[in-house]
Image: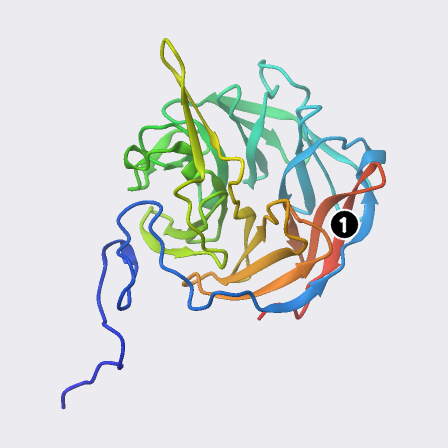
Amino acid sequence: MKKLKPPGYILCTLLLFTYCTAGEPEIETFTDRIPQQQDERVISKEIMLEPVVNLTQLGIFSPGRINLIGDYIMWSDFRSGRLLGINPVGGDQLFSIGSRQGSGPGETGRISGFVLYDDRVIAIDRQNMKIIHWDYWTGEFITEFKIEGYHPQHLQFLSDNLFVVQSMRQHGALFYLIDSTGKIVGSVADSTNHIGHPMKTAGHMSSSDDAFYFAGFSEPILRKYSSDGELFFSRATIDNYDTSEQYTETAFEGGGRAFGFADDARYAALYLKHYDGYLIAANSNNGVRGDNFIDIYDGENGDYMASWLTDRQVTGFAIIDDVLYTKGLIDDDIYLLGASVEGYFP
């Protein structure tokens, strides 16, 4: 018996482990994306963030990138050059890793990513171009390695002694697979050579046991790669918009160029996290929209599922036991804020 195809669809196989339906674009370049099936958000829950700990009183004055390291929510502190964190369940005891800003052994310039691996906190210092190891239990410096061949922006753990970084160089691969010493062991097929404007590749990363994910900061794009770099999907976010007039480029006499964003540019993801099979993206309100959203996508195929409406803009977060934590200002102090999201997932 002849097997009938579903009406209205053309079944096809594309390269890079993606799919298409009638009228959908092929994924040939980094900015190509398959639209979502719907155009508007579905608000499933409203989140009210409540103060948990006063971070300013603990000495965390300039918290930057956030990550969950063991039992601790940690930030790269721009002022001190250290990694500072607390256990939100165990109280307000400050945990510190690193010594001070500088270029010497164990000293940091600007940390652009950090993870926990084999009882070590491993961090990327993009200013000093090195990867640093500290002891997780004591916070003491262990060793460091010079980075060569890429300019790292993020760091995500994949599997045993395998990590992925995004490179901000204008030439070469966009993502590199590295070991714990920073040595390149592989690269993702996407090349920056054909992208054109480097700001198109700005974004945020997350990972699971067998994959890593990318959400664009200015391009409304959501991507999933296998741990060996094969593309599973490239989807538009729920805020899909034209980016052709989004970027600026200035050439200087004598050579050199500066890249930036147009005054009326729109922005997409401010943060991305894989959690319990979901991709969770904190969304930019672009300075004019009154509402603040956290968008939920299916981690398997990138399908938009629902959104949470928050009472403030969230620029980074960690989730522990279905409690979402972030930072925020209350009066003049920086606080760790929290809200339960138990039962909030689609």
- State the quadrant of the N terminus: bottom left
In this rendered view, identify the residue nearer to me: 82 or 173. 173
Quadrant assignment, res 324: bottom right
Q: In which image quadrant can residue 190 be found?
A: top left
Q: Mark 1, residues whose alpha carbon is within 10 Å: few (<14), some, or many (≥20)? A: many
Please indicate whether residue 241 sits to the left or right of residue 100 in the image.
left
Residue at horizontal 66 percent and vertical 56 percent from the top: 291
Q: Position of residue 339 (x, y in %)?
A: 74, 58
For the view shown, which residue lies furthest in the top direction?
Answer: 254
State whether residue 181 appears in this view: no
Quadrant of the snapshot with the C terminus: bottom right
How is the model colour-coded? rainbow
**Occupied quadrant, residue 255:** top left
List x then y, in percent, for residue 259.
Answer: 44, 27
Please, what is the three-letter code of the amino acid marked with disc 1? Leu
Q: Residue furthest bottom?
A: 1
Q: Is residue 298 visible?
A: yes
